[in-house]
Protein backbone atom coordinates (compact mmCIF):
# COMPACT_ATOMS: atom_id res chain seq x y z
CA UNK A 1 0.00 0.00 0.00
CA UNK A 2 1.37 3.36 -0.92
CA UNK A 3 0.40 6.88 -0.28
CA UNK A 4 1.60 9.93 -1.92
CA UNK A 5 0.28 13.36 -2.15
CA UNK A 6 0.20 14.50 -5.72
CA UNK A 7 0.39 18.19 -6.10
CA UNK A 8 0.73 20.07 -9.31
CA UNK A 9 -0.16 23.48 -10.49
CA UNK A 10 0.43 23.06 -14.17
CA UNK A 11 -0.87 25.78 -16.38
CA UNK A 12 -4.08 26.23 -14.52
CA UNK A 13 -4.68 22.74 -13.29
CA UNK A 14 -4.18 21.48 -9.82
CA UNK A 15 -4.27 17.78 -9.32
CA UNK A 16 -4.27 16.27 -5.94
CA UNK A 17 -4.46 12.59 -5.56
CA UNK A 18 -3.95 9.71 -3.26
CA UNK A 19 -2.28 6.66 -4.67
CA UNK A 20 -3.52 3.72 -2.70
CA UNK A 21 -2.41 0.72 -4.70
CA UNK A 22 0.80 0.40 -6.63
CA UNK A 23 0.26 0.55 -10.39
CA UNK A 24 -3.36 1.50 -9.92
CA UNK A 25 -3.20 5.22 -9.53
CA UNK A 26 -6.51 6.90 -8.94
CA UNK A 27 -5.16 9.95 -10.70
CA UNK A 28 -2.61 10.84 -13.27
CA UNK A 29 0.25 13.26 -12.91
CA UNK A 30 1.19 11.93 -9.56
CA UNK A 31 4.07 13.63 -7.91
CA UNK A 32 5.66 11.90 -5.00
CA UNK A 33 6.45 14.20 -2.19
CA UNK A 34 8.51 13.56 0.86
CA UNK A 35 6.43 15.21 3.50
CA UNK A 36 9.46 15.59 5.69
CA UNK A 37 10.38 18.36 3.27
CA UNK A 38 7.56 20.58 4.51
CA UNK A 39 8.71 24.14 4.41
CA UNK A 40 5.75 26.01 5.71
CA UNK A 41 2.03 25.97 6.12
CA UNK A 42 -0.58 28.46 4.98
CA UNK A 43 -0.99 29.46 8.57
CA UNK A 44 1.92 30.39 10.73
CA UNK A 45 1.12 27.67 13.19
CA UNK A 46 0.59 24.33 11.43
CA UNK A 47 -1.71 23.31 14.21
CA UNK A 48 -4.07 26.17 13.36
CA UNK A 49 -4.29 24.92 9.81
CA UNK A 50 -4.94 21.41 11.00
CA UNK A 51 -7.56 22.56 13.47
CA UNK A 52 -9.41 24.46 10.76
CA UNK A 53 -9.35 21.60 8.29
CA UNK A 54 -11.67 18.75 7.66
CA UNK A 55 -11.03 15.93 10.08
CA UNK A 56 -9.68 13.55 7.45
CA UNK A 57 -7.40 16.15 5.96
CA UNK A 58 -6.32 16.80 9.49
CA UNK A 59 -5.57 13.19 10.02
CA UNK A 60 -3.68 12.97 6.78
CA UNK A 61 -1.65 16.04 7.45
CA UNK A 62 -1.04 15.01 10.96
CA UNK A 63 0.37 11.76 9.76
CA UNK A 64 2.31 13.55 7.09
CA UNK A 65 3.70 16.26 9.26
CA UNK A 66 4.42 14.33 12.32
CA UNK A 67 5.22 10.97 10.90
CA UNK A 68 8.64 10.13 12.18
CA UNK A 69 10.21 8.82 9.14
CA UNK A 70 11.13 8.94 5.52
CA UNK A 71 9.22 7.68 2.49
CA UNK A 72 10.73 5.49 -0.14
CA UNK A 73 10.84 6.57 -3.76
CA UNK A 74 7.33 5.26 -4.30
CA UNK A 75 5.97 7.44 -1.56
CA UNK A 76 5.58 4.64 0.91
CA UNK A 77 6.08 5.50 4.52
CA UNK A 78 8.95 3.53 5.88
CA UNK A 79 8.46 2.05 9.31
CA UNK A 80 4.92 3.32 9.47
CA UNK A 81 2.68 1.03 11.52
CA UNK A 82 0.63 -0.82 8.96
CA UNK A 83 -2.47 -0.79 11.09
CA UNK A 84 -2.62 2.98 11.06
CA UNK A 85 -2.10 3.15 7.33
CA UNK A 86 -4.87 0.68 6.71
CA UNK A 87 -7.19 2.52 8.99
CA UNK A 88 -6.82 5.74 7.10
CA UNK A 89 -6.68 4.35 3.58
CA UNK A 90 -10.36 4.44 2.75
CA UNK A 91 -10.86 7.84 4.28
CA UNK A 92 -7.99 9.23 2.29
CA UNK A 93 -9.31 8.03 -1.00
CA UNK A 94 -12.73 9.48 -0.34
CA UNK A 95 -11.30 12.73 0.84
CA UNK A 96 -9.10 13.20 -2.14
CA UNK A 97 -11.94 12.47 -4.51
CA UNK A 98 -13.90 15.17 -2.76
CA UNK A 99 -10.93 17.45 -2.91
CA UNK A 100 -10.53 16.92 -6.63
CA UNK A 101 -14.19 17.74 -7.18
CA UNK A 102 -13.76 20.96 -5.30
CA UNK A 103 -10.70 21.89 -7.30
CA UNK A 104 -12.53 21.14 -10.54
CA UNK A 105 -15.53 23.18 -9.47
CA UNK A 106 -13.20 25.98 -8.64
CA UNK A 107 -11.63 26.04 -12.05
CA UNK A 108 -14.97 25.74 -13.77
CA UNK A 109 -16.00 28.75 -11.78
CA UNK A 110 -12.95 30.58 -12.99
CA UNK A 111 -13.62 29.78 -16.60
CA UNK A 112 -17.00 31.49 -16.34
CA UNK A 113 -15.58 34.60 -14.80
CA UNK A 114 -13.32 37.43 -15.75
CA UNK A 115 -10.45 35.30 -14.58
CA UNK A 116 -11.09 33.03 -17.55
CA UNK A 117 -8.60 34.85 -19.66
CA UNK A 118 -5.97 34.49 -17.04
CA UNK A 119 -6.49 30.80 -16.83
CA UNK A 120 -6.80 30.12 -20.53
CA UNK A 121 -3.79 32.12 -21.50
CA UNK A 122 -1.95 31.24 -18.41
CA UNK A 123 0.29 28.51 -19.71
CA UNK A 124 3.12 28.09 -17.38
CA UNK A 125 4.28 31.65 -17.07
CA UNK A 126 1.11 32.80 -15.38
CA UNK A 127 1.10 29.92 -12.99
CA UNK A 128 1.70 32.27 -10.15
CA UNK A 129 -1.37 34.29 -11.00
CA UNK A 130 -3.45 31.16 -11.04
CA UNK A 131 -2.03 30.29 -7.72
CA UNK A 132 -2.95 33.68 -6.38
CA UNK A 133 -6.53 33.17 -7.50
CA UNK A 134 -6.52 29.68 -6.15
CA UNK A 135 -5.22 30.87 -2.87
CA UNK A 136 -7.93 33.47 -2.59
CA UNK A 137 -10.82 31.23 -3.52
CA UNK A 138 -9.89 27.73 -2.68
CA UNK A 139 -10.45 26.62 0.87
CA UNK A 140 -7.41 24.45 0.46
CA UNK A 141 -3.92 25.76 0.10
CA UNK A 142 -1.66 25.49 -2.87
CA UNK A 143 0.28 22.45 -1.97
CA UNK A 144 3.44 23.67 -3.61
CA UNK A 145 3.52 26.27 -0.90
CA UNK A 146 3.29 23.68 1.77
CA UNK A 147 5.89 21.33 0.55
CA UNK A 148 8.73 23.57 -0.44
CA UNK A 149 11.20 21.43 -2.31
CA UNK A 150 9.22 18.47 -3.62
CA UNK A 151 12.20 16.19 -3.73
CA UNK A 152 12.95 13.21 -1.65
CA UNK A 153 15.56 13.83 0.94
CA UNK A 154 17.68 10.86 1.95
CA UNK A 155 17.28 9.66 5.51
CA UNK A 156 19.56 11.69 7.67
CA UNK A 157 22.77 9.98 8.64
CA UNK A 158 24.57 11.97 11.26
CA UNK A 159 28.31 11.85 10.92
CA UNK A 160 31.32 13.58 12.29
CA UNK A 161 31.13 16.03 9.45
CA UNK A 162 27.51 16.73 10.04
CA UNK A 163 26.50 16.50 13.65
CA UNK A 164 22.78 16.35 14.36
CA UNK A 165 21.40 19.81 14.78
CA UNK A 166 20.59 20.91 18.26
CA UNK A 167 18.30 23.87 18.38
CA UNK A 168 18.58 26.36 21.17
CA UNK A 169 16.40 24.76 23.77
CA UNK A 170 15.21 27.02 26.51
CA UNK A 171 13.93 23.97 28.33
CA UNK A 172 17.50 23.21 29.33
CA UNK A 173 17.43 25.91 31.94
CA UNK A 174 17.32 24.22 35.31
CA UNK A 175 15.63 27.22 36.81
CA UNK A 176 12.94 27.32 34.20
CA UNK A 177 9.63 28.49 35.52
CA UNK A 178 6.17 27.71 34.30
CA UNK A 179 6.13 31.12 32.68
CA UNK A 180 9.34 30.40 30.84
CA UNK A 181 7.91 27.09 29.77
CA UNK A 182 4.85 28.87 28.43
CA UNK A 183 7.10 31.29 26.56
CA UNK A 184 9.07 28.40 25.16
CA UNK A 185 5.83 26.98 23.84
CA UNK A 186 5.80 29.74 21.29
CA UNK A 187 9.30 28.94 20.13
CA UNK A 188 9.14 25.27 19.20
CA UNK A 189 9.01 25.13 15.45
CA UNK A 190 7.26 21.81 14.84
CA UNK A 191 8.84 21.44 11.44
CA UNK A 192 12.33 21.81 12.87
CA UNK A 193 12.50 20.24 16.32
CA UNK A 194 15.35 18.41 17.98
CA UNK A 195 15.67 14.92 16.60
CA UNK A 196 16.36 11.77 18.58
CA UNK A 197 18.39 9.40 16.47
CA UNK A 198 18.10 5.64 16.54
CA UNK A 199 21.33 4.11 17.87
CA UNK A 200 22.34 2.76 14.46
CA UNK A 201 21.90 6.27 13.00
CA UNK A 202 23.78 7.87 15.87
CA UNK A 203 27.40 8.70 15.16
CA UNK A 204 30.32 7.24 17.06
CA UNK A 205 31.24 10.63 18.49
CA UNK A 206 27.67 11.16 19.65
CA UNK A 207 27.63 7.74 21.27
CA UNK A 208 30.84 8.53 23.10
CA UNK A 209 29.54 11.91 24.27
CA UNK A 210 26.27 10.38 25.45
CA UNK A 211 27.83 7.54 27.42
CA UNK A 212 30.48 9.84 28.91
CA UNK A 213 27.78 12.27 30.04
CA UNK A 214 26.00 9.46 31.91
CA UNK A 215 29.28 8.53 33.56
CA UNK A 216 29.73 12.18 34.45
CA UNK A 217 26.44 12.09 36.40
CA UNK A 218 27.69 9.01 38.23
CA UNK A 219 30.81 10.95 39.22
CA UNK A 220 28.94 13.96 40.59
CA UNK A 221 27.67 14.21 44.16
CA UNK A 222 24.05 13.55 45.01
CA UNK A 223 21.73 16.53 45.12
CA UNK A 224 20.85 15.92 48.76
CA UNK A 225 19.27 13.82 51.48
CA UNK A 226 15.87 13.98 49.82
CA UNK A 227 17.22 11.33 47.45
CA UNK A 228 17.04 8.37 49.78
CA UNK A 229 20.04 6.05 49.48
CA UNK A 230 21.72 7.98 46.71
CA UNK A 231 25.52 8.17 46.53
CA UNK A 232 25.81 10.23 43.34
CA UNK A 233 23.85 12.42 40.96
CA UNK A 234 22.88 9.53 38.70
CA UNK A 235 21.54 7.63 41.68
CA UNK A 236 19.26 10.58 42.48
CA UNK A 237 17.32 9.41 39.44
CA UNK A 238 17.10 5.85 40.79
CA UNK A 239 15.87 7.21 44.09
CA UNK A 240 13.17 9.37 42.51
CA UNK A 241 11.90 6.50 40.38
CA UNK A 242 11.85 4.11 43.32
CA UNK A 243 10.07 6.61 45.56
CA UNK A 244 7.27 7.03 43.03
CA UNK A 245 7.06 3.46 41.81
CA UNK A 246 3.53 2.78 43.03
CA UNK A 247 2.02 5.77 41.26
CA UNK A 248 3.94 5.63 37.99
CA UNK A 249 3.41 1.99 37.06
CA UNK A 250 0.09 0.44 36.18
CA UNK A 251 -1.58 3.83 36.34
CA UNK A 252 -2.41 6.37 33.66
CA UNK A 253 0.74 8.25 34.68
CA UNK A 254 3.02 5.53 33.30
CA UNK A 255 3.61 6.92 29.81
CA UNK A 256 3.60 10.62 30.63
CA UNK A 257 5.69 10.31 33.78
CA UNK A 258 8.36 8.22 32.09
CA UNK A 259 8.44 10.66 29.15
CA UNK A 260 8.96 13.43 31.66
CA UNK A 261 11.60 11.36 33.48
CA UNK A 262 13.61 10.77 30.30
CA UNK A 263 13.43 14.52 29.68
CA UNK A 264 14.70 15.21 33.22
CA UNK A 265 17.57 12.83 32.54
CA UNK A 266 18.31 14.63 29.25
CA UNK A 267 18.30 18.03 30.97
CA UNK A 268 20.72 16.75 33.61
CA UNK A 269 23.10 15.50 30.94
CA UNK A 270 22.96 18.88 29.24
CA UNK A 271 23.00 21.24 32.21
CA UNK A 272 25.20 19.32 34.59
CA UNK A 273 27.52 17.42 32.26
CA UNK A 274 27.78 19.61 29.18
CA UNK A 275 26.15 17.14 26.82
CA UNK A 276 25.33 19.12 23.67
CA UNK A 277 24.39 16.48 21.10
CA UNK A 278 21.14 15.08 19.85
CA UNK A 279 19.63 12.36 21.99
CA UNK A 280 19.68 8.74 20.85
CA UNK A 281 16.94 6.17 21.13
CA UNK A 282 17.05 2.41 20.70
CA UNK A 283 14.72 0.56 18.34
CA UNK A 284 14.23 -2.66 20.28
CA UNK A 285 11.98 -4.16 17.62
CA UNK A 286 15.09 -4.63 15.47
CA UNK A 287 16.68 -6.76 18.17
CA UNK A 288 13.68 -8.69 19.50
CA UNK A 289 14.89 -12.11 20.56
CA UNK A 290 18.53 -11.06 20.15
CA UNK A 291 19.13 -8.12 22.46
CA UNK A 292 22.56 -9.46 23.34
CA UNK A 293 23.65 -9.01 19.73
CA UNK A 294 22.62 -5.36 19.60
CA UNK A 295 25.52 -3.01 19.47
CA UNK A 296 24.27 -1.07 22.46
CA UNK A 297 25.45 -4.11 24.46
CA UNK A 298 29.09 -4.02 23.48
CA UNK A 299 32.35 -3.46 25.26
CA UNK A 300 32.50 -0.07 23.64
CA UNK A 301 29.17 1.18 25.02
CA UNK A 302 26.81 -0.24 27.63
CA UNK A 303 28.72 -3.48 28.22
CA UNK A 304 27.68 -7.00 27.47
CA UNK A 305 24.41 -8.77 28.11
CA UNK A 306 25.22 -12.13 29.68
CA UNK A 307 22.69 -14.93 29.96
CA UNK A 308 21.08 -15.92 33.20
CA UNK A 309 23.33 -18.21 35.21
CA UNK A 310 22.31 -21.84 35.76
CA UNK A 311 20.82 -20.95 39.11
CA UNK A 312 18.81 -18.10 37.62
CA UNK A 313 21.05 -15.25 38.75
CA UNK A 314 22.47 -12.24 36.99
CA UNK A 315 26.12 -11.61 36.23
CA UNK A 316 28.02 -8.50 37.25
CA UNK A 317 28.89 -6.38 34.23
CA UNK A 318 32.64 -6.22 33.79
CA UNK A 319 32.87 -4.84 30.28
CA UNK A 320 31.89 -1.58 28.63
CA UNK A 321 31.72 1.92 29.99
CA UNK A 322 29.76 0.89 33.08
CA UNK A 323 31.94 -2.05 34.04
CA UNK A 324 32.30 -2.47 37.76
CA UNK A 325 29.51 -0.06 38.68
CA UNK A 326 28.44 -0.36 42.31
CA UNK A 327 24.80 0.49 42.95
CA UNK A 328 23.74 1.72 46.37
CA UNK A 329 19.97 1.84 45.92
CA UNK A 330 17.92 -1.34 45.89
CA UNK A 331 17.17 -4.05 45.40
CA UNK A 332 13.61 -3.10 46.25
CA UNK A 333 13.38 -0.84 49.28
CA UNK A 334 16.84 -1.88 50.55
CA UNK A 335 19.93 0.26 50.15
CA UNK A 336 22.52 -2.46 49.74
CA UNK A 337 25.74 -2.17 47.76
CA UNK A 338 25.46 -4.45 44.77
CA UNK A 339 26.89 -4.68 41.29
CA UNK A 340 25.28 -3.65 38.04
CA UNK A 341 24.16 -7.04 36.75
CA UNK A 342 22.19 -8.44 33.83
CA UNK A 343 20.67 -11.80 32.93
CA UNK A 344 19.28 -11.92 29.45
CA UNK A 345 16.32 -14.10 28.56
CA UNK A 346 15.90 -13.80 24.82
CA UNK A 347 12.55 -15.59 24.92
CA UNK A 348 11.32 -12.48 26.73
CA UNK A 349 13.16 -9.93 24.60
CA UNK A 350 11.51 -11.67 21.65
CA UNK A 351 8.26 -10.05 22.78
CA UNK A 352 9.62 -6.61 21.92
CA UNK A 353 8.81 -7.38 18.32
CA UNK A 354 7.11 -5.31 15.67
CA UNK A 355 3.88 -7.32 15.70
CA UNK A 356 3.42 -6.88 19.43
CA UNK A 357 4.27 -3.20 19.18
CA UNK A 358 1.87 -2.72 16.29
CA UNK A 359 -0.90 -4.53 18.11
CA UNK A 360 -0.51 -1.99 20.92
CA UNK A 361 -0.36 0.88 18.43
CA UNK A 362 -3.73 -0.22 17.06
CA UNK A 363 -5.40 0.40 20.41
CA UNK A 364 -7.84 3.27 20.32
CA UNK A 365 -7.73 4.65 23.84
CA UNK A 366 -4.86 5.94 25.93
CA UNK A 367 -5.62 3.41 28.65
CA UNK A 368 -5.67 0.46 26.25
CA UNK A 369 -2.46 1.50 24.54
CA UNK A 370 -0.66 2.25 27.81
CA UNK A 371 -1.68 -1.04 29.37
CA UNK A 372 -0.78 -3.04 26.27
CA UNK A 373 2.64 -1.50 25.98
CA UNK A 374 3.52 -1.32 29.65
CA UNK A 375 2.76 -4.97 30.26
CA UNK A 376 3.87 -5.99 26.78
CA UNK A 377 7.12 -4.89 25.15
CA UNK A 378 8.02 -2.57 28.04
CA UNK A 379 7.71 -5.29 30.66
CA UNK A 380 9.34 -7.95 28.53
CA UNK A 381 12.25 -5.62 27.83
CA UNK A 382 12.86 -5.09 31.53
CA UNK A 383 12.56 -8.75 32.39
CA UNK A 384 14.41 -9.89 29.30
CA UNK A 385 17.49 -7.82 30.16
CA UNK A 386 17.04 -9.10 33.67
CA UNK A 387 18.71 -8.68 37.06
CA UNK A 388 18.83 -4.95 37.91
CA UNK A 389 16.51 -4.10 35.02
CA UNK A 390 14.00 -6.72 36.14
CA UNK A 391 13.54 -5.15 39.55
CA UNK A 392 11.02 -2.44 38.72
CA UNK A 393 11.62 0.14 41.42
CA UNK A 394 15.43 0.38 41.18
CA UNK A 395 15.78 -0.63 37.54
CA UNK A 396 17.09 2.86 36.73
CA UNK A 397 20.39 1.60 38.18
CA UNK A 398 21.19 0.06 34.81
CA UNK A 399 21.80 2.98 32.43
CA UNK A 400 20.23 0.89 29.67
CA UNK A 401 16.98 1.82 31.46
CA UNK A 402 16.97 5.13 29.59
CA UNK A 403 17.57 3.52 26.21
CA UNK A 404 14.67 1.20 26.98
CA UNK A 405 12.42 4.06 27.98
CA UNK A 406 13.42 6.07 24.93
CA UNK A 407 12.01 3.12 22.97
CA UNK A 408 8.85 3.25 25.07
CA UNK A 409 8.57 6.98 24.46
CA UNK A 410 9.13 6.52 20.74
CA UNK A 411 6.24 4.09 20.58
CA UNK A 412 4.07 6.44 22.62
CA UNK A 413 4.78 9.24 20.18
CA UNK A 414 4.03 7.07 17.17
CA UNK A 415 0.70 6.18 18.79
CA UNK A 416 -0.01 9.87 19.38
CA UNK A 417 0.87 10.74 15.79
CA UNK A 418 -2.16 8.89 14.51
CA UNK A 419 -4.60 11.40 15.98
CA UNK A 420 -4.00 14.98 17.16
CA UNK A 421 -6.39 14.54 20.07
CA UNK A 422 -3.92 12.10 21.56
CA UNK A 423 -1.66 15.06 22.27
CA UNK A 424 -4.33 17.01 24.12
CA UNK A 425 -6.37 14.50 26.09
CA UNK A 426 -5.76 11.97 28.81
CA UNK A 427 -7.88 9.80 31.06
CA UNK A 428 -7.54 7.18 33.74
CA UNK A 429 -6.30 7.04 37.31
CA UNK A 430 -3.28 8.98 38.56
CA UNK A 431 -2.87 6.61 41.51
CA UNK A 432 -4.02 3.27 42.83
CA UNK A 433 -6.27 4.65 45.58
CA UNK A 434 -9.89 3.56 45.70
CA UNK A 435 -11.58 5.67 44.56
CA UNK A 436 -8.62 6.86 42.55
CA UNK A 437 -7.52 10.38 41.73
CA UNK A 438 -8.36 10.92 38.06
CA UNK A 439 -5.44 12.07 35.96
CA UNK A 440 -6.04 15.42 34.25
CA UNK A 441 -4.13 17.78 32.00
CA UNK A 442 -3.18 19.69 35.15
CA UNK A 443 -1.83 16.71 37.08
CA UNK A 444 1.73 17.60 38.05
CA UNK A 445 4.52 15.21 37.15
CA UNK A 446 7.40 15.46 39.59
CA UNK A 447 11.07 14.52 39.80
CA UNK A 448 11.32 15.44 43.46
CA UNK A 449 12.92 18.72 42.51
CA UNK A 450 15.62 17.52 40.12
CA UNK A 451 13.82 19.61 37.53
CA UNK A 452 10.57 21.61 37.79
CA UNK A 453 7.32 19.72 37.94
CA UNK A 454 5.43 19.77 34.66
CA UNK A 455 1.71 19.41 34.08
CA UNK A 456 0.52 16.51 31.96
CA UNK A 457 -0.67 18.90 29.25
CA UNK A 458 2.90 19.94 28.49
CA UNK A 459 4.26 16.44 28.54
CA UNK A 460 1.65 15.09 26.14
CA UNK A 461 2.98 17.19 23.28
CA UNK A 462 6.59 16.56 22.34
CA UNK A 463 6.40 19.63 20.11
CA UNK A 464 4.53 21.79 22.57
CA UNK A 465 7.36 24.09 23.55
CA UNK A 466 8.64 22.75 26.83
CA UNK A 467 9.47 19.69 24.80
CA UNK A 468 10.57 20.15 21.23
CA UNK A 469 11.63 16.84 19.80
CA UNK A 470 10.73 14.13 17.40
CA UNK A 471 12.31 10.83 16.46
CA UNK A 472 14.27 10.19 13.29
CA UNK A 473 11.67 7.59 12.29
CU1 LIG B 1 9.44 2.82 35.60
Image (cartoon, rainbow, N blue to C red):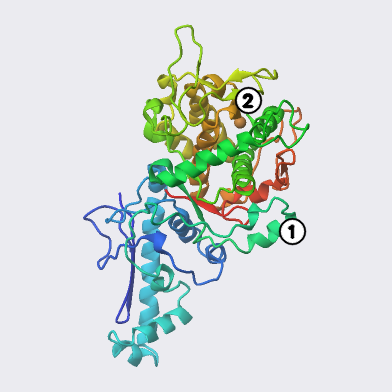
Q: Which mark is residue 242?
A: none
Percent position of residue 164, x then y: 45, 54
Q: Which element is circle 2 on?
A: helix
Q: Is residue 435 above or below residue 211?
A: above
Q: Which element is circle 1 on?
A: helix
Residue at coordinates 48% horizontally, 6% vertically from top-left?
311
Identity of the residue furthest to the left in this view: 23
Residue at coordinates 64% horizontally, 39% vertically from top-left?
257
Upstream in sequence: badge 1 or badge 2:
1
Residue at coordinates 74% horizontally, 54% vertically from top-left?
177
Percent position of residue 405, x then y: 54, 36
Circle 1: is it few (<14), some (14-19), or many (20+) Cα within 10 Å? Answer: few
Q: Quadrant of residue 102?
A: bottom left
Residue 362 seen by the camera: no
Relative to 41, 180 lies left or right: right
Q: Is residue 4 above or below residue 434?
A: below
Residue situated in front as seen by the camera: 460 or 164: 164
Query: Mark 1 to mark 2: distance in Å?
Result: 33 Å
Circle 2: is it few (<14), some (14-19), or many (20+) Cα within 10 Å? Answer: many
Q: Quadrant of residue 292?
A: top left
Percent position of residue 61, x then y: 46, 59
Q: Which residue is mark 1?
A: 179
Percent position of residue 141, x then y: 45, 73
Say whether marks 1 and 2 touch (CB < 8 Å): no
Between circles 1 and 2, the one closer to the viewer is 2
Q: Which quarter holds ligand 1?
A: top right
Q: Is residue 75 above or below residue 375?
A: below
Q: Which residue is mark 2?
A: 394
Quick check: is the Cβ at mark 2 less than 8 Å away from ligand 1? no
Residue situated in front as seen by the camera: 143 or 97: 143
Amino acid sequence: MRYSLASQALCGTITVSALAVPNEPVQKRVQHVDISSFKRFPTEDPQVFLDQSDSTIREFFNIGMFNDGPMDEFGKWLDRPQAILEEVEDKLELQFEKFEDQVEDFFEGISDSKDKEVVQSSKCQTKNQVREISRAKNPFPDFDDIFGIPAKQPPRQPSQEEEPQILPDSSRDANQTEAAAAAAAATCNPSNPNVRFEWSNYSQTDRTAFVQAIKCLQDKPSGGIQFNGSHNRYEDLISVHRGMTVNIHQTAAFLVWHRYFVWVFEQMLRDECGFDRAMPWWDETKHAGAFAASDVFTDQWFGNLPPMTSNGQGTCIETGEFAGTTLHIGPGSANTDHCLSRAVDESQTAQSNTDFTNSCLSMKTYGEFANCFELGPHGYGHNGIGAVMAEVSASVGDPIFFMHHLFVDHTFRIWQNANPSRRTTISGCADKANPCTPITLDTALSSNGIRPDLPVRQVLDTLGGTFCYRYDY
